[in-house]
Image: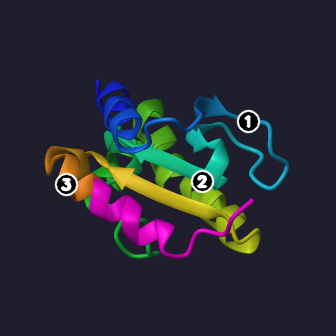
Amino acid sequence: KPEENLYSLLKEMYKGFTIERQYNKDPRYPFYCDFYIKELDFFIELQGCWTHGKEPFDGNNLPESWKSKAETSKYYKNAVDVYTKKDPEKRSYASRNDLNYLEIWNGDLDKGLDWVASLSYLSMVRLKPL
């Protein structure tokens, strides 16, 4: 499972740090966050399901097949809602509250530990201490 794979990578990368899963104890981000690294005040979301797309929604990149399938399928209608509304809302909260925030897609996990470490490092360059 992608979430288990990422958790293993994070434990290896952040030995000695507190990594909380399904974290929801922060009013700055009123959603369940896949991973939270307490000592770094670092929120990490894994976009591991196809309903999150392969990249952030930019207003124009909703797959055409999703649009047509959403007309008759509750499952696709929900996927469109997640991709075009819920995920952007989470990004907006993270940005407005200047959170240390990283989204990782399945394709990132497929590239291995070094790739995830580089994504994490790039995010950490801007991390603010607690």
Q: Which residue is mark 3?
A: 114
Picture residue at 34% right of the left edge, 63% below the top: 119
Instruction: Judge the density around disc 3: few (<14), some (14-19), many (≥20) Cα neighbours within 10 Å.
Output: few
Q: CA distance from mark 2 to mark 1?
A: 13 Å
Quick one: quadrant of the C terminus?
bottom right
View extreme (front): residue? 16
Q: Nearer the viewer, mark 2 or mark 1?
A: 2
Q: Where on the picture, by quarter, is residue 57?
A: bottom left
* Residue 92 x/y as whole percent: 66, 68
View extreme (right): residue? 27
Q: Earlier in the sequence, mark 3 or mark 2?
A: 2
* Residue 12 x/y as whole percent: 33, 36
* Residue type highlighted by circle 1: Asn
* Residue 9 x/y as whole percent: 31, 37
* Residue type highlighted by circle 3: Asp
Helix, strand, or loop for circle 1?
Answer: loop
Q: CA distance from mark 3 to mark 2?
A: 19 Å
Quick one: quadrant of the N terminus?
top left
Residue 42 tag number: 2
56 falls in the magenta region: no
Residue 24 tag number: 1
Picture residue at 66% right of the left edge, 72% below the top: 95
Residues rendered magenta in the picture: 117-130
Q: Earlier in the sequence, mark 2 or mark 1?
A: 1
Residue 23 at least partly seen: yes
Helix, strand, or loop for circle 2?
Answer: strand
Instruction: Judge the density around disc 1: few (<14), some (14-19), many (≥20) Cα neighbours within 10 Å.
Output: some
Q: Are marks 2 and 1 in contact (CB under 8 Å)?
A: no
Whether residue 97 sits left or right of residue 106 in the image: it is: right
Residue 54 at least partly seen: no
Q: Earlier in the sequence, mark 1 or mark 3?
A: 1
